[in-house]
Amino acid sequence: MATRGLPTWPWAGLSPEDLRPVEALVLDAVRAWVEATRCGAQPALAARLPLATEDVADAADPLDAALRALACPGGMGCRLCPRVTAAEARFLTGLALAQRGTNREAVACFLRLAPPAAACAALAPSVAFGQVLRRAGLLLTHPLRPGG
């Protein structure tokens, strides 16, 4: 019987260069958003720049809304961090699950980053983010199924 959920988070501890291009793109956008937030700049605009490289700049607004709902979770890395942090892995996992329509599991991931109300508030923008990526042909890896 499981007593603590996922034993390890998908992507946690990996080098950003080891990620698939879609996950690396999202990680770049998240890290740009976090850096802009910490510096007092415009986070949505900062996230838009990496996303524009794959013609999904429209995904910046839902990403911004999801991260704001979670109140910029602690433990997120900077642009030069050599490894994916546990918080980033949890957020990426939640986004991937939301894109796949597994909303309860996505909220469960977000609950590791924020209180229940905030985790639930992050779901709708996460689904919208996933839809923008999907329309562009970008599908995040299903984190709970090998090869998914």
Image (spheres, rainbow, N blue to C red):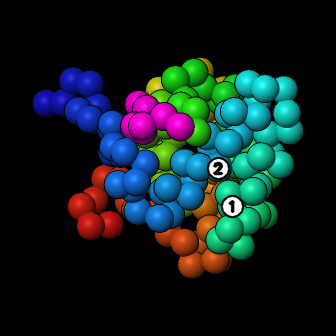
Foreground: 9 or 3?
A: 9
In the rendered image of this protein, does residue 58 appear above or below residue 1? below
The picture quadrant where one finds residue 53 is: bottom right
Q: Are marks 2 and 1 in contact (CB under 8 Å)?
A: yes
Span of residues in magenta? 80-86
**Residue under the point 26% across and 67% down:** 147
**Residue under the point 59% across and 72% down:** 134
Marks 2 and 1, the one that precedes in the sequence: 2
Residue 110 screen position, x and y as percent: 53, 34
Side (left or right) of 107 relative to 46: left
Q: Is residue 41 magenta?
A: no
Location of mark 1 (residue): 51
Instruction: Give the residue type at disc 2.
Output: Ala
Q: Which structural element holds mark 2?
A: helix
Image quarter in which the C terminus is found: bottom left
Location of mark 2 (residue): 29
Label 2 to label 1: alpha-carbon separation? 6 Å
Q: Is residue 84 magenta?
A: yes
Residue 71 screen position, x and y as percent: 70, 26
Residue 40 screen position, x and y as percent: 84, 26
